[in-house]
């Protein structure tokens, strides 16, 4: 057999190894929500839609009401308030870095951001319209949207609405914390921050669920766990609540509508989606990115401070392990210092500047 020439070997090696790698990279860029970039006109449309209270039943609630750019895309309420000042059952998480999430809402009931962004429009406890199509009708009838809609390809429908909102959210600047700046050289962190990182990965066992994976690190395992928070609202009536859920689901009542209307169903957690016994009272592991700026904490907003969150997490993690995790006062201070290093400076104006809007909250 004739020996292969050197140039031919190079070409064959390129085809066998480089080409597949390029295809994988291209596919990754196309599928990774964080990396997709929309056109300026599409971002302008998404930004306007996000801040428009006319897309609610009473003309008072927009997406930005619960996800305020001036507050790192949270509302800092225990649980959010919707149309006609109607209270809900869930704390609004920050939308920064939302493109990196694998599921949405505390129970993970949606796995596509394009589906998740439409739900609040028709939830009676949020924006209260009859459907996403009702929002489309409002938008197309509003002359102020005409210049933006004219730049779109094709008709403006529910799909275009979902694309505009999700594209805008994916465009939000990622959190840039002290940890992000020094992730490749943690010696630049303060001594307390470094010791806190060691505790986070070791004795405190935080990284078992809040994984330091990805670039930037996601600080979540994207899974669902029992945190021992809020389930007492359903305790003693779990069987009845499960029956109530099953009956409502048989009537095709949306899960999100049930959860925000019924505090007991809300505490069923992931079970409301899967109806698997092991998911009873389980909620999505939240990211810890920017954690110091997004109080209050947990799915029901019942934990007011980061220090309290640390104490509760250590307590319930000890119960889950069957043996205590004992942190000294100094170690708790160090762990708190590390968590604060995962956050942007409190006066960081980057998200609000990108949103192009003032604080939406009163």
Image (cartoon, rainbow, N blue to C red):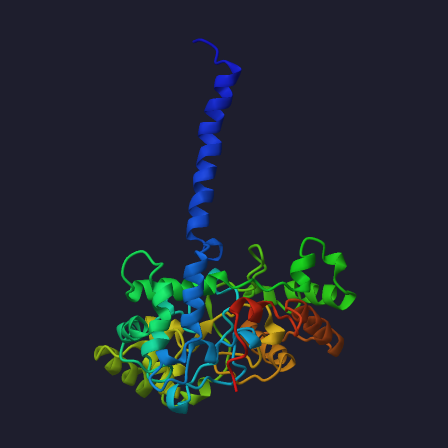
* Residue sitting at x 37%, y 65%: 147
276 lies above or below 87: above
Quadrant containing the N terminus in the rendered view: top left
Residue 361 visible in the current orientation: yes
Residue closest to the eye, 163 or 274: 163
Residue 29, how many percent across, how many down? 46, 49
Q: Residue at horizontal 41%, vertical 64%?
A: 166
Residue that protrudes farthest toward the right in the picture: 191
Question: Residue shown at 47%/43% (left/top)?
Answer: 25
Image side of residue 154 versus residue 14, left or right: left
Horizontally, is 80 left or right of 191 in the view? left
Q: Position of residue 130 (x, y in %)?
A: 27, 80
Q: Nearer the viewer, residue 313 or 306?
A: 306
Q: Is residue 250 left or right of residue 267?
A: left
Quarter-wise, where is residue 350 in the image?
bottom right
Pinpoint residue 151: horizontal percent, then vertical percent.
36, 58
Residue found 74% across the figure and 79% down from its top: 329
Q: Of all residues shown, which one is farthest toward the left?
A: 251
Q: Is residue 105 visible?
A: no
224 over 281 or under it: above or below:
above
The picture places residue 333, in percent across and down from the top left corner, at 72, 75
């Amino acid at each position: 057999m004739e020996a292969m020439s050197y140039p031919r070997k190079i070409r064959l090696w390129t085809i066998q190894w480089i080409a597949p790698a390029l295809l994988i990279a291209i596919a990754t860029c196309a599928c990774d929500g964080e990396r997709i970039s929309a056109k300026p006109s599409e971002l302008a449309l998404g930004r306007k839609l996000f801040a428009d209270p006319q897309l609610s039943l009473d003309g008072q609630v927009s997406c930005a009401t619960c996800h305020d750019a001036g507050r790192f895309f949270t509302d800092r309420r225990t649980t959010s308030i919707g149309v006609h000042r109607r209270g809900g059952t869930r704390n609004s998480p920050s939308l920064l870095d939302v493109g990196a999430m694998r599921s949405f809402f505390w129970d993970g009931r949606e796995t596509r951001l394009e589906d998740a962004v439409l739900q609040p429009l028709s939830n009676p406890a949020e924006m209260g319209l009859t459907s996403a199509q009702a929002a489309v009708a409002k938008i197309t009838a509003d002359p102020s949207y005409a210049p933006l809609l004219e730049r779109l390809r094709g008709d403006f429908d529910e799909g275009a609405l979902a694309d505009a909102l999700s594209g805008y959210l994916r465009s939000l600047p990622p959190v840039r914390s002290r940890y992000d700046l020094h992730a490749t050289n943690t010696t630049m962190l303060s001594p307390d921050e470094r010791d806190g990182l060691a505790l986070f990965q070791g004795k405190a066992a935080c990284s078992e669920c809040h994984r330091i994976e990805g670039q930037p690190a996601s600080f979540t395992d994207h899974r669902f766990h029992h945190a021992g928070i809020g389930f007492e609202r359903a305790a003693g009536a779990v069987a009845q609540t499960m029956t109530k859920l099953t009956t409502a689901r048989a009537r095709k009542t949306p899960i999100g509508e049930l959860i925000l209307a019924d505090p007991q169903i809300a505490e069923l957690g992931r079970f409301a989606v899967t109806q698997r016994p092991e998911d009873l009272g389980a909620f999505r592991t939240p990211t810890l990115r920017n954690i110091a700026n997004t109080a209050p904490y947990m799915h029901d907003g019942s934990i007011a401070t980061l220090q309290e969150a640390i104490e509760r997490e250590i307590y319930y993690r000890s119960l889950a392990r069957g043996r205590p995790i004992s942190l000294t006062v100094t170690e708790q201070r160090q762990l708190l210092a590390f968590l604060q290093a995962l956050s942007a400076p409190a006066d960081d104006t980057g998200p609000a500047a990108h949103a192009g809007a003032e604080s939406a909250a009163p």
